[in-house]
Amino acid sequence: MPIFRYQCQECNSEFELLLPRYDSPAECPKCGSVKLEKALNRVGVISSAPAGASCAMRNECPSGGCCCAGSCGHKH
């Protein structure tokens, strides 16, 4: 289920909701309004691995194989 970010048009609060689909109904948890605007959701990634390190080098794959469908160059 995706997380969507909203801004309420009634009370101006910003919040995130976990919804099953893009078009699922939502309401403001602060005031209960359904007058919402979807806001831009920012995504960030932090890695402590050196640049160019494979996913296996970052210990992200429990099986020790490649988690990125081979795009990092690590063999399965």
Image: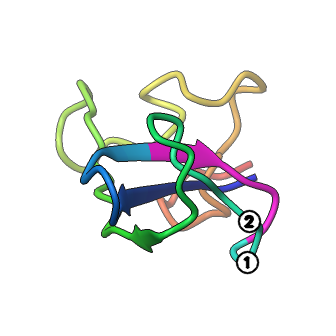
Identified by mark 1, the residue type is Asp
Q: In this view, does 73 lie above or below 65?
A: below
Q: Which disc is residue 23 wearing?
A: 1
Dot 2: element: loop
Q: Which disc is residue 51 wearing?
A: none
60 vs 67, left or right, is left
* Residue 25 in which image quadrant: bottom right
Residue at position x 42%, y 71% in the image: 38
Identified by mark 2, the residue type is Pro
Q: In this view, does 64 lie above or below 24?
A: above
Q: Mark 2 = which residue?
A: 25
Magenta residues span 16-21
Residue at position x 60%, y 56% in the image: 68
The Cα–Cα distance between marks 2 and 1, rounded to whole angstroms, is 6 Å
| Near-viewer residue (36 or 66) | 36
> Residue 57, percent across and down?
44, 29
